[in-house]
Image (tube, rainbow, N blue to C red):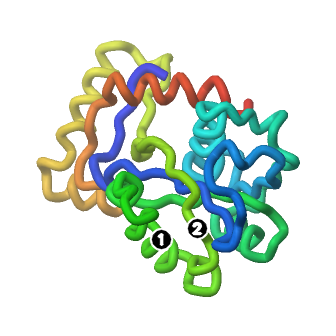
């Protein structure tokens, strides 16, 4: 990619690694031998970031998990854990909830119950939380002429300044404005590219 822009809203979020509320597992390293239920192989919060989190903790999913299965959505993966068909799954939570570790991520647990309903959310426990995940971005293709890239970039970054442009941002990408990519996002993308499945 040549340029990437991330939406300023919603802000960064995180992935919560979840086990059944009555699970004996107490930390990421205790997931060795677990059966993982993932959302989709291209989901940042439902697959990619949780797997990176496992790797960083010394748990290589390829060798240390008993199995990995994709369920198509985070909700379906969570249901598989509650039903006893898997031992761990992942679901998005807000950056604020993920950063509030005191008291067993109570805000995160509340968000999960709101997103999944009591039948599922109340029967899951947050085991750990990933680093922040940046919002979605827009990519300019490499074949674009450098001067044209600059024009498009400037137009996108100033789109929120026009009333019609602001409405388009809200309607198309649910954002209040676009921001240029940061160095931290570039590092995150490099990590993801090393572990993301090839299309």
N-terminal of the pair, mark 1 or mark 2, is: 1
Residue 44 visible somewhere in the drawing: yes
Q: How far apart are marks 1 and 2 (CA)?
A: 7 Å
Mark 2: which secondary structure? strand
Residue 54, given in percent of the width and then of the height, sits at 64, 39
Residue 59, given in percent of the width and then of the height, sits at 71, 36
- Toward the top, the furthest residue is 146
Q: From this view, report whether residue 11 is shown above or below residue 170.
A: above
Residue at figure coordinates x 49%, y 25% from the top left = 141
Quadrant in which the C terminus is drawn? top right
Q: From this view, report whether residue 150 is shown above or below residue 95.
A: above
Residue 126 versus residue 48: which sits nearer the camera?
126
Q: Do the residues labelled 1 and 2 touch (CB within 8 Å)?
A: yes
Residue 135, given in percent of the width and then of the height, sits at 40, 46
Residue 64 is left or right of residue 78, and the answer is: right
Residue 111 versus residue 147: which sits nearer the camera?
111
Mark 1: which secondary structure? helix
Residue at figure coordinates x 71%, y 63% from the top left = 24
Q: Mark 1 points at which residue?
A: 109
Where residue 86 sits, quadrant-wise, is bottom right
Dot 1 alpha-carbon crowd within 10 angstroms: few under 14, some 14 to 19, many 20 or more: many
Q: From this view, report whether residue 98 is shown above or below residue 133.
A: below
Say the numbered circle drawn on residue 128.
Answer: none
Residue at figure coordinates x 65%, y 47% from the top left = 47
Residue 173 visible somewhere in the drawing: no
Dot 2 alpha-carbon crowd within 10 angstroms: few under 14, some 14 to 19, many 20 or more: many
Say the numbered circle drawn on residue 125.
Answer: 2
Residue at figure coordinates x 61%, y 45% from the top left = 50
Residue 198, given in percent of the width and then of the height, sits at 73, 30
């Amino acid at each position: 990619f040549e340029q990437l822009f991330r939406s300023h809203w919603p802000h960064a979020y995180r992935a919560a690694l979840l086990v059944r509320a009555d699970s004996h597992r107490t930390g990421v390293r205790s997931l060795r031998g677990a059966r993982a239920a993932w959302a989709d192989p291209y989901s940042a919060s439902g697959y990619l970031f949780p797997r990176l989190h496992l790797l960083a903790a010394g748990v290589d999913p390829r060798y240390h998990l008993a199995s990995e299965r994709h369920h198509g959505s985070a909700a379906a993966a969570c249901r598989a854990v509650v039903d006893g068909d898997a031992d761990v799954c992942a679901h998005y939570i807000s950056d604020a909830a993920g950063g509030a570790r005191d008291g067993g991520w109570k805000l995160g647990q509340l968000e999960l119950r709101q997103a999944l309903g009591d039948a599922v959310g109340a029967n899951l426990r947050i085991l750990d939380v990933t680093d922040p995940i940046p919002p979605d971005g827009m990519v300019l293709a490499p074949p674009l002429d450098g001067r044209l890239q600059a024009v498009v970039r400037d137009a996108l970054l100033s789109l929120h300044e026009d009333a019609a442009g602001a409405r388009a941002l809200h309607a198309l990408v649910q954002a209040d404005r676009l921001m240029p990519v940061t160095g931290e996002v570039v590092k995150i993308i490099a990590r993801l590219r090393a572990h993301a499945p090839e299309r």
